[in-house]
Amino acid sequence: MNHNCLGSILGNDRGVALLITLSIIAILLTVSLELNRRVRIGILAAETGKTDYQLMEIATSGLNVAMALLVKDAEQNQIDTVQEEWSDPEALDKIIASLGFDAGNMTVKITDEMGKIQVNALINEYPGHEVNPDQRQIWENLLSFFISSDKSEDQRDPQEIINCLIDWLDDKDGETITGISGAESPYYNALKIPYKCANRQFFDLNELLFVKGISDTLLVTADNFDTLFADVENQENQNKELQLKDIFTVFGAEKNTSGAEKKYRFSGKINMNTAPVQVIAALLPFGKQDLAESISDYRRMKPDGDSGFTNDLSIKDWYAGIAGLTKKETAALAKRITYSSDLFSMESHARLNGRSLVLTRVVKRQQDKTGKWFCKTLRQQIE
């Protein structure tokens, strides 16, 4: 064999072997880098998953604390007020801190749902179509705070909005109840994205946004509102747009039997001891809305240099003198209010490793067959 040919073959073999070796190294390097990337992603995912799990546990603990406070409160008295521990942010922070949670890692807020306007109470009974005149008056008062009477500035009509709400709630899909100023299925079916009029109660406040005339800016502060509540106690609400959940609730259904047909209703009663100032104003007779702030302040008044509260909110009609109500006005208002609650919403904010979670829950406080108090969860969601 020719020595030159043999050398050429051997040389080619060495070149091929080198190429194969380099290819294998490149493949191994690529595999190694991809494996390293996946391991790092897995570690980050595991850490994130661990953090999320811890956040859920922290937030759940906050809700458990809130429910324990509400049970404790029910065992101690029969009224619910802004003076109580569950309603005091500072008291709640101290309780959370006593459990060993670092400052800021968890905050809890409890709100009385009975201190809000029950949107479903506009109809007396479900299924049905009879309008509750007292609830309609409350809506008229409330909307007057946020909708200007000057049509050159605000084209919205409070009566039209209320009629559209009634049409959404009642079980008739026609104009016999509210006339042409309402809105039934033909109006909603003609929209760009069509849908039907529900003709039933609201199950979630977000459903309000489907009703003609209602938007997430419904409660934007207007000039007449600023004038009426210029020195409102809750400054943080004065400096932000109120949300629907601050004023309204969909909860409060009460089962009852009317004849052979099972029906249910919403009492519409509002807890005067916990209602926000805007709701108090909507409850008061026309011309006395500006005294809502004085009523709100009265509830939280404290003696100088002393703990506790000055005024007793368990006294019947305690608000009447502050608002200058006549006996007739007091009697009329007494039908719309209560002093105790059984429905509460709670928020638990958990923070850890730069991440956060908000867990919300609506509960009904009630007694079991032995008389022991407990909180039944009606709704829970993660935000």
Image: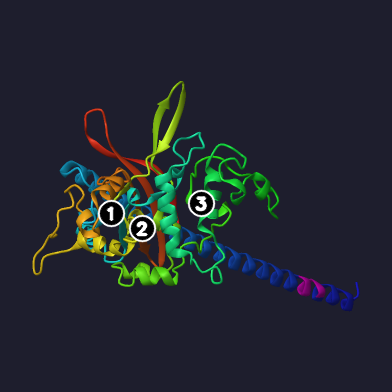
Evaluate whether residue 348 shows in this view.
Answer: yes
Q: Is residue 107 left or right of residue 202?
A: left
The label shown at residue 286 is 2
Q: Nearer the viewer, residue 318 or 270?
A: 318
Q: Comparing marks 3 and 1, which lies closer to the viewer?
A: 3
Q: On the image, which quarter does residue 348 sit in?
A: bottom left
**Disc 2 secondary structure class:** loop
Between discs 2 and 3, the one toward the N terminus: 3
Between discs 2 and 1, the one toward the N terminus: 1
Q: Which residue is mark 1?
A: 274
Q: Which residue is mark 3?
A: 162
Residue 158 picture location, percent across and down: 50, 57
Magenta residue check for 13: yes
182, above or below 354, in the image = above
Give the amino acid type for the residue marked by disc 3 in the picture.
Ile
Residue 261 picture location, percent across and down: 47, 24
Circles 3 and 1 in contact, beta carbons < 8 Å: no
Give the amino acid type for the residue marked by disc 2 in the picture.
Phe
Q: Comparing marks 2 and 3, which lies closer to the viewer?
A: 2
255, above or below 226, in the image = above
Magenta residue check for 357: no
Q: Comparing marks 2 and 1, which lies closer to the viewer?
A: 2
Residue 122 picture location, percent across and down: 45, 44
Distance from disc 3 to disc 1, alpha carbons, whole Å, reads 25 Å
Residue lying at the far top of the rendered structure: 260
Label 1 Cα neighbours within 10 Å, binned few <14 / some 14-19 / many ≥20: many
- The magenta segment is 12-16
Give the amino acid type for the residue marked by disc 1 in the picture.
Thr
